[in-house]
Amino acid sequence: MRIFLLLGAISGFLSVALGAFGSHVLKGKLNDYLLSVYHTGVTYQTTHALALVLVSLLCKWYPESSVLTWAGWCFTVGTLLFSGSLYALSFTNIKALGAITPFGGVLFLAGWALIAVHAWKSVS
């Protein structure tokens, strides 16, 4: 599905821009803990931007696999919840926002598990 290639490219672009913003603009404005939280969001966004590109390629090779489509949506929503909540936490220091982050992490895990399911089904 081209949508995952587009979403992966946009997410990758934004992760580089947000990483640079964090390193150059936020460095003196956030304390070390909040800057670390911010950079964790950037790292996971970058990783899962690449995962979305991978899913788009796999969808091209296996267009009949709905499992891969679900994996792509898990990575997309996972990025919004995980990285988004960390960005919001780092800017606001509202600790309750950290309660959202694990939901994004579970979606990341689900996305990787779905790719594993697809691999298992493809081999058998």
Image (cartoon, helix red, strand yellow):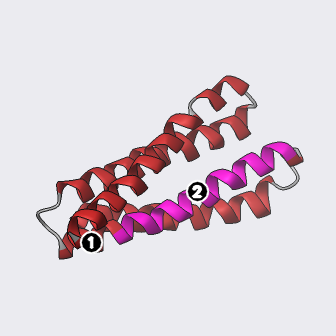
Q: Amino acid at mark 2?
A: Tyr
Seen in the image, is 52 located left or right of residue 95?
left
In the rendered image, residue 47 lying in the magenta stretch gets the answer: yes
> Which disc is residue 32 wearing?
none
Relative to 14, residue 101 above or below: above
Relative to 82, residue 124 above or below: below
The alpha-carbon separation of the residues under discs 1 and 2 comes to: 21 Å
- Range of residues picked out in magenta: 33-54
Q: Which residue does the numbered mark 2 point to in the structure image? A: 44
Q: Which residue does the numbered mark 1 point to in the structure image? A: 58
Residue 98 on image: x %, y %: 65, 31
Dominant secondary structure, magenta: helix
Q: Quadrant of residue 19?
A: bottom right
Q: Residues within 10 Å of mark 2 (few under 14, many from 20)?
A: some
Screen quadrant of the N terminus: bottom left
Task: Say which residue appears at 55% left-offset and 43% top-offset.
Answer: 82
Seen in the image, is 34 located left or right of residue 123?
right
Q: Residues within 10 Å of mark 1 (few under 14, many from 20)?
A: some
Q: Amino acid at mark 1?
A: Leu
Seen in the image, is 23 located left or right of residue 55?
right
